[in-house]
Amino acid sequence: MRAYLMTIVKGREAVEDCLQETALVVWEKFDPNWNEEDFRRFSFRCARYKALNWIKKHESRGMVFMDPEVARRVCERVESLSIQERRSDGRVEAIEACIEGMPQRQRALLDARYASSGCEDLARFADETGTTMAALYKQLERLRTALRKCVQTRLGQHE
């Protein structure tokens, strides 16, 4: 979802704002009868509307964004992809295998960073391990590089 929002709005703050607002709407309107595909489509549609609203609110400040028509087309294309189509290139399986092959501490760090509460969990992880946030961010940078190389290797790609 974060990557999807990055195609519409620019800047980490904008993406995080839209992501949080989307999560609130999805939480409030969630229907337990939805299947995975219904949930995904609803979530991405909400994200698109939140991003477009964010753009409208901030356009007057002179910020430049992707042309709304281009953003709409990209959004529609992503929404139309089924889960199977998005997984067909093997990337999901590759990243899962790469993460599974990591030592437990590295997996715990990734969990702390990418869990739903993100920074709070990362700060707690820093406290528990006696590590500074700066050191954790450096470790995360190295982990992302290692994961990218691992996925590329598994998919037979080279930089």
Image: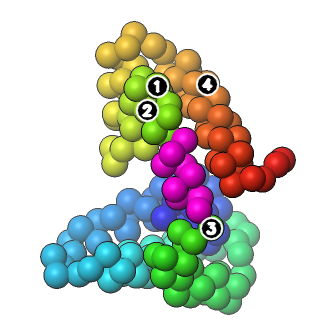
- In contact (CB < 8 Å): disc 1 and disc 2: yes
In this view, 1 is above or below 99:
below
> Where does label 1 land, which residue?
103
Q: At which x and y percent is residue 68?
A: 66, 84
Tell me, yes or no, whether the highlighted magenta stretch contains residue 136. Answer: no
Residue 135 quadrant: top right
Q: Determine whether the residue tagged by mark 1 lies in a helix, strand or loop.
A: loop
Q: Residue at x 40, y 26 (%)?
A: 104
Q: Which mark is residue 107?
A: 2
Mark 1 surroundings: few (<14), some (14-19) or many (≥20) residues within 10 A: few
Q: Are marks 1 and 3 in contact (CB under 8 Å)?
A: no
Spatial separation of the CA atoms under disc 2 and disc 4: 15 Å
Q: The magenta stretch spans which residues? A: 90-98
Amino acid type at mark 4? Lys
The residue that disc 3 covers is 89
Magenta stretch, main secondary structure class: helix
For the residues bearing labels 4 and 3, Cβ distance under 8 angstroms: no
| Depicted 90 relative to depicted 100: above or below | below
